[in-house]
Amino acid sequence: MRSYSRRAFLKLLALSAAALSVPRLAQADGAPFPIYLTFDDGPTTDRDGDGATVEVLDTLSRENVPATFFLHGSAINAWEGSVLVRMIDAGHAIGNHLWQHDGNTLADEPSMAHLAEQYLQCERRIHQMLAETDERAYRRYLAQPRLFRRPGGNNGLNDFLNPRNFASLERAPALRPYRKYLAWLQGVYDYSGWHVSNGDSLPRSAPADPEAMRDWLLYGRGSYQGVRRYLCAGEPPRRATEARQGLIVLMHDAVPLTRRALPLLIAALRDLGATFHALPRPADQPNAPAIGIGYPPTPDPLGQACAP
């Protein structure tokens, strides 16, 4: 009887140990990781104070989620100073998306001086609107790290933000009117890349409803990575390096489906353990390459084990 009791005890002990080991894998998706929601091409509002960007700001306020807005200078209308102030006051970050989209993508092949001019034009517009609307918010913006994203994206550091090219920019004839602003090109975090998209910028294959957009965000499609691919990657399967550093999500606040789906997207990310932040990420450096577009997850030997 004593021998049977010992065998039963050891069996029970083994089963208990196995049971304790299962939650480590099952709960891997729920371990916290940083997420950085970003919205491009705004602001988009109406003269009466409503509009796409305000709707997104309302949702982020209800969800208590900070984000980053990359703005085109040409899109900032005379009545939108209060929208920029609201972004700053709510703890969001404002980034520079150049004066306009057209003519500034990689396919357009603009000169380095032209991109610098577009950046400085946009930056001056942001400064002007904040300074004219709310001095306190303007000072908070000046204290915020400078952020940039190129229209259409880019896998590396854009040349006009490379310190090796600053001397050349100082001599560029097109930048003579901006010489007193050239210091604004220093200390800029280049986020022309991103990890994950919600699919709203791909009209031929964009998701058709909020649930499809959630699945695009979580699982990706084709060569586009999804959040879950970064949470469980490699062999043996572990959290990827990018999940530890923080995943950057590309979206567009002017897209109606993005606005409809945003509460669902936030809830799905929270279920996975996401914590929300505004750029920059702590480990990134200004005037240096940050991340690329569509790169596969990087195996992390120190990453948390997960169940694929």
Image (cartoon, rainbow, N blue to C red):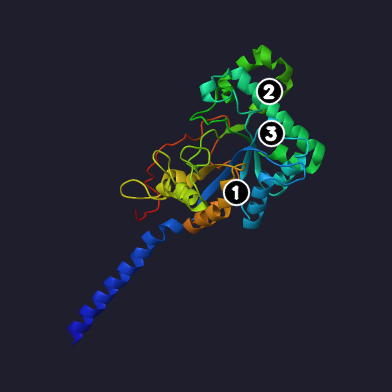
Nearer to the camera, 235 or 86: 86
Q: Quadrant of residue 151?
A: top right
Label 3: which secondary element: helix
Quarter placement of the N terminus: bottom left
Q: Name the residue under label 2.
A: 182
The CA span between labels 3 and 2 is 22 Å
Instruction: Point out the tag, 1 or 3, that comes first from the N-terminus.
Output: 3
Label 1: which secondary element: helix
The CA span between labels 2 and 1 is 36 Å
Disc assigned to residue 269: none
Q: Return the x and y of residue 140 as percentages of the image width and height.
A: 73, 42
Q: Return the x and y of residue 142 as percentages of the image width and height.
A: 72, 37
Q: Name the residue under label 3.
A: 75
Residue drawn 67% across the image and 44% down it: 53
Q: Return the x and y of residue 90 as percentages of the image width and height.
A: 69, 49
Q: Return the x and y of residue 292 as percentages of the image width and height.
A: 47, 34
103, above or below 29, in the image:
above
Left or right: 291 as drawn, with respect to 144:
left
Residue type indicated by callout 2: Leu
Nearer to the camera, 54 or 164: 54
Q: Name the residue under label 1.
A: 259
Question: How dense is the environment of label 2, judged by Cα within 10 Å: few (below 14), some, or many (20 and up)?
Answer: some
Instruction: Point out the tag, 3 or 2, that comes first from the N-terminus.
Output: 3
